Amino acid sequence: MKQSSMMPVLAAIVTLLVSGCSTDPSSDYVQDGSILVESNASIDLLSATIILPLDRYGMDDHEVRLVSAAQDLALMACVNEEGGMSGAGVSGAQEILAEPESFANWLYGYWDATFISANGWETSSGVQRSSDMNETDLVKAKECVKVQSYIDLSPIYPGVASYDSVADQFQSAWSEAYSATISDPEFLALVDERSACLQSEGYQVSNTGSFDGVTILKDATDEEILQAAIAEATCSDKLNFTEQAADINAGYQQKYIDTHQAELTALRQLADERVNRATQILRDAGVM
């Protein structure tokens, strides 16, 4: 899916408190006609993104920003114990909506060497708005994120921490398919091929991660990291590593979809309802 390091646009304070791509399911994903590989998973080389089957039932980046902005308004209103929207809440919501669309995801390591050469290896990770809440407000906020009106605006998107059981089920299904993918014998065989490619180019391979990426030394410069990322991406591209890995991942997701079609259809409807509700909240507040 279109992910930015598995984190969508959420205010940093909300993520801390909780933790301590929209398309019709039946349609193909198309972005400016830029799909270059279409199989069980969709690979877009222009934005270095991967769209997996389950992603079609969750929210896309734009929808995540909408519900996150509405949540931000709800959080600030709750913290300030106001009936209306505070200036800080409106400003925060506008800040979230103004963030550029997330791009690039390295689900199985670096790939798309052309993209990395032009844009770097770091992904757009969405707004991480610094909070100016005092200690009293932080205590209130810990309770506000548990309020049902706030929970009912939770993004349905992998990587989002929330108190929403529906969103968590989606996250769990997505994560379980990913975990199965990176331990799949076929995937591990692909990893061995890429490791051999990297080693032939003089790079060390890290054995500490899930997919043996190129070793990045702690004192490496940005330029050295960039060149290492390009080397890994070049090997991935040469072997069609990401396309094959994404298809393995898609296979595990499809097994879940086949046995939970009704629930997922209802989930997509719920996502639409949340986006519509968030849009109305933002309009009423004068944010959009």
Image: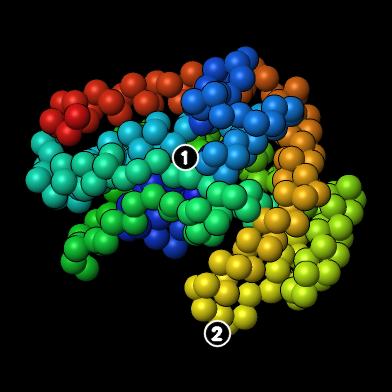
Quadrant location of residue 62?
top left
Pinpoint residue 53: horizontal percent, then vertical percent.
66, 29
Q: Is residue 37 above or below residue 116?
A: above
Disc with the residue nearer the chain's start (2 vs 1):
1
Q: Residue 254's x, y, as percent?
A: 75, 28
Q: Position of residue 21 (x, y in %)?
A: 51, 31
Q: Marks 2 and 1, Cα distance to the nearest angstrom?
A: 40 Å
- The amino acid pointed to by label 1 is Asp
The answer to whether any part of residue 179 appears in the image is no
Whether residue 132 sits left or right of residue 156 in the image: it is left
Q: Are marks 2 and 1 in contact (CB under 8 Å)?
A: no
Query: Residue 215 at what x, y percent from top left?
Result: 69, 74
Most extreme residue toward the top is: 26
Query: Residue at 20% of width from left, 62% of height from top?
Result: 133
Q: Quadrant of residue 147?
A: top left
* Residue farthest bottom in this picture: 219
Position of residue 44 in the picture relative to residue 209 (left or right): left
The one of 222 and 109 positioned closer to us in this rendering = 222
Quadrant position of the N terminus in the picture: top right
Residue position marked by numbered label 2 in the rendering: 219
Tell me the residue at 40%/41% (across/down).
Answer: 101
Which kind of residue does numbered mark 2 sit on? Asp
Residue 164 tag number: 1
